[in-house]
Image: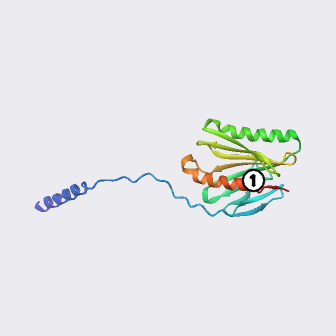
Amino acid sequence: MIKLRFIALILIAFILQSCEQEYTPKPRGFQRIELPKKEYKLFETECGFSCDIPVYSIMKNDDYPGAEKCWFNLNYEPFNATLHLSYKPINSQADLLKMTEDSRTLVYKHTIKADEIYETFISNKYIHGMLYEISGNTATNFQFYVTDSAHHFLRGALYFNIKTNTDSIAPVLDFLKLDVIKMIETLRWN
């Protein structure tokens, strides 16, 4: 009986001693993201265009059942993101108008969740088009279309393959936007 009381007393002493330390919670943090060095390689296709893409990405044909021949997915595997690209030839000015309006409609479907949608007109001697930056917790934060207005039309939409929080993807989104802009700057029609 004395042994049992002695063990209980020691156990209570240990429990009371452990309560003397103050608990300090860890601060909230996010995963550290290592961004690779910007390097590019030429991507050429029989579909009417070529451009530079990052070496840390993989261009694949879109294998979705409804996908057309010249639809591609540029997979950014280190970031779990995909740039969906759709190339279409222009047969008439009515086609061009329909494709630009379809692109705009697809962007503005995100109005429900978007805080703002910024439109930026882009133009150089080979292309002109529109960049759309969609702020807020939307499925896509960056889309674009480019065309030569006569023969070629290319549309792109950047998606992360997970449910995202705008604050947590901001560094990666900014990093990938630069890659997409580089792709647009180096785009050449074949």
In the image, what residue occupies the spot 16% across and 58% down? 9
**Left or right of 80 in this view: 2:** left
Secondary structure at numbered mark 1: helix
42 w.r.t. 165: above or below:
below
Other-residue count near label 1 (Cα within 10 Å), few / some / many at <14 / 14–19 / ≥20: many
Which residue extends farthest top?
112
| Count of numbered marks | 1
Q: Which residue is drawn at 61% across and 57% down?
A: 79
Q: Is residue 148 visible?
A: yes
Report x, y in % for residue 120: 71, 43
In the rendered structure, the answer to whether residue 113 lies left or right of residue 190 reads left
Where residue 34 appears, as percent x and y from the top left, is 56, 61
Write the residue at 77% across / 61% down: 43
Quadrant the C terminus occupies: bottom right
Q: Name the residue under label 1.
A: 184
Q: How is the image coloured?
A: rainbow
Q: What amino acid does circle 1 point to?
A: Ile
**Residue 21 percent across, percent down from the top left:** 27, 56
Residue at the outermost right position: 92
Residue 16: x, y in percent? 21, 55
Establish if 117 lies above or below 164.
above
Q: Which residue lies furthest to the left in this view?
A: 2
The structure residue drawn at horizontal position 73% and vertical position 56%, both measured from the top left corner, is: 183
Q: Looking at the rendering, which quadrant does residue 74 occupy?
A: bottom right
| Placement of the N terminus among the 4 image quadrants | bottom left
Q: Which of 105 and 73 is in front in this view?
A: 105
Q: Is residue 165 among what the camera can see?
A: no
